[in-house]
Image: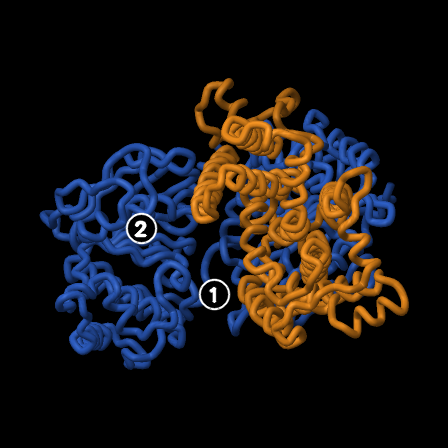
Chain colours: A orange, B blue
Amino acid sequence: MSEQNSPVAPALAGEGHIAGGLPPANPKQRVLNRVLGGSAGRSIGLVIALLLLFAVGTITAGDRFANVENVLTIIRFGSILGVISIGMTFVITAGGIDLSVGSLMGLTSVVATLSWVQDFADSTNWIVMVVIALAVGAGAGLINGIVIAYGNVVAFIATLAMLVGARGLAEVLANRTTQIVRQQGFLDFFRGDILGVSILIWIFAIVVAAGWFLLNRTTFGRRTVAIGGNLEAARLAGIKVKRHMTSLYVLSGLTAGIAGLMMVGRTTAGTSTHGTLYELDAIAAVVVGGTLLIGGRGTIMGTVLGVLIFSTLTNVFTQNNLSTSVQAIAKGAIIVIAVLLQQRFATRASRSK
Amino acid sequence: MITVDQGIPLLIVRGLTKSFAGVRALKGVDLEILPGEVHCVLGQNGAGKSTLIKTLSGVNQPDEGEIVWRGQPVTISDPVAALELGIATMYQELDVVDGLTVAENIFLGHEFATAGVTERRKTSRRAQEIMTRLGHGGISPNREVGTLSAANKQIVSMARALSHDTKLIIMDEPSAVLDSEEVKNLFRVVGELTAAGIAVIYISHRLEEIREIGDRITVIKDGTTMATNLAVADTPTQDLIRLMTGRTVENVFPPAVPVAPDAPVLLAVDGLGLAGSFDDVSFEVRAGEIVGLAGLVGSGRSEIIETVYGARKQTSGTVTVEGTRVEPGSVRAGVHAGMGLSPEERKSQGLILDEPVYRNVTLASFTRWARFGLLSERSERAVARKQLEALELRPADPDRPARTLSGGNQQKILLARWLVHGTRVLLLDEPTRGVDVGARAEIYTLIRRLAAEGTAIVVISSEIEEVLGLADRVLVVAEGRVIHTTAASDIDEHGVLDLVMKGSAA
């Protein structure tokens, strides 16, 4: 995404001809359309929405809301969802979808906390738990990717199957129990903080930075956009589309593994119910953030803002002792409004071609 | 820079054949390209030009035949192989990615990168160089392609073709989205490329363009090379048109029945226009009359018929059916007024492929047999069966899924649908596309019979001969305007092509 070169004020000089189908808007309006239609513009909209939420929080909850501690709580609350949303951003940018991430969080949390894994970690190092969880997440993603890219199964169905199957496997492995973490090294790390900031937030920040770099600064990221934007053009340009699609689902599975570990850290336990419905929250955050559900346009910063909007919303409601049900209604409204706006921009953009 | 080695062909194609699902798209194409020449490939729609391009650019694999590249027989297994040989293609449909920048598009698939990290400065600089060479240095390499006009996207597409070590560029109707000023720039670029020894295969309908920049011409018709290596300078236009026209397959058209002068006007189209597509189209169709729209792909003929039907909303003008003005942009109103459309894409736009034949027939009117919202399958089937018998559907089994029938019989299902519905005005878009030659005559007879029974029919086809053979009256369409109206008996294929090509030069 051109977060770095925002198309806010493209130099019209030197371009001989503007498309014939451009709506006869006055120049001011046209500039406005471009500002709002560009990714930077969408991000500005999200920042405004976030500020509004902060204002509401400050007015209704006063100092309880507006303090550094609470802001860190909001970010920490969003960090786990944030990590899988970054993986989801890649998949959706390429025109795919991954419904399995929530279940994979459950599965990886269970596998990482299996008693033999913890024993093994005790006798070696807690990193073992991390490596195994990440391997399980990436492996499940690989299966998703192969079924989708090489088996030509629609991503929605393939990952839906993984959603169901992984949750079941997690239940079998955990024997429907909650597996408490007794590995102290693991707990020390995941429940610790650096410079007073929770390690969960650090992990989120690192994943965001890596995701941004990968999407915007590497051939992998740019090819992801190409595949989502114009599959045929990508193929004709010699991109190995199947392999690329597969690796995107591996990436998404990997973020589910990271999120599963963060969940274990936060709750000090692994259970098959971890991450339930997280896939839908992640999709919502990605779409609200401005990544096109049909692919071809993705923004990491937008996703981060989408995640923060949702976690701030939850925080504001909790501070005001409002029920989670009311919260859910507000969340639904936000999703619809965001997508409606997005579609308006999309049609406007296609009309001006 | 490539050394210009005139005389030794860069590319030789011999006896290329290619079939798709039993239909022979190429039946033996020969082609020879010299370094540094502009070689024009001429042919009507459906002659096999696109298949030829796709075969040379590695998208299709030929069934038979030989491709010799710089003296060596080669197999072009995929697009990457073509690019590695030095064959780059600019496709007619824009093959750029809107979400990427100009520079990213140009180097997509062969980016400058260190360990996967793109070298943005170098990419930008090289993109800028190529764009400047193409006379569009003003377009910033960091601009998102989605914000560019169609013409400028084409420039990006060409820049991409040049970003490889290209020895042959295939341009598929590059001027289609360009205005005259941009066409001049395109020709300047082509001139520079050929001066550097790069060969260009140039595909265009516009004879004037070919006269201006072409060196030699190959004419393709019905998947076969009719003539090759004609010098542009001394081949008369009449000869080219003669080579492009005239079918090798005999088509049998039923005799036209004179339309009674007092026959009522069933369809009246007045000053119809759709911004950006066509303008000021007026015609009338009487009961029993077949009116044909002749024009090339992209002339606006499909858009006209879809707008008449209500599938698109006109920006000006009116459509009147049997004296009643039809609400613009409403298919429901169109069908209610008595119009029926058999669309160009039968499979995606016309039929529900997995439903049985009879349900497809009754689709537009099944509520008629419904009682309290419940469908009466038996009466539906009976009505469909009667109609299908009249149309001689084969196999005459109303319960088979529509998918299993041949193209010709699928067309009959659509005709039956509108007959059951009591349609008075029938709009047929490419009625014989995908229909084999034997079945065509049958479809033609059916269409003529429907007219004789008092239906007003509008037919459009990319096969000019079909329009002329079938219609009573012909409207020649070019670039969204009706440029000529005449009795079908007063014009031949030749004349239509002449009009279309002159029209598009304007």
Instruction: Give the residue number, with chain letter if any, for mark 2.
Output: B292
Going by the numbered disc 1, the residue's amino acid type is Thr
The residue at which mark 1 appears reads as B248
In terms of image quadrants, where is residue B387?
bottom left
Q: Residue B337 in the image: state x and y as whole percent.
A: 17, 49
Label 2 neighbourhood size at 10 Å, few (<14), some (14-19), many (20+)?
A: many
Element at badge 1? loop
The one of A202 and B274 positioned closer to us in this rendering: A202
Q: Position of residue A325 (x, y in %)?
A: 44, 48
Residue positioned 44% across, 67% down in the render = B249
Pointer 2 indicates a residue of which chain?
A: B
In the image, taking residue B365 as reference, residue A164 lies left or right, namely right
Task: Identify the residue at image location x=68%, y=50%.
Answer: A83
Residue B375 sits above or below residue B90 on the image? below
At numbered mark 2, what does the secondary structure look like: helix, strand or loop? strand
Q: Taking B280 as reference, is B276 left or right?
A: right
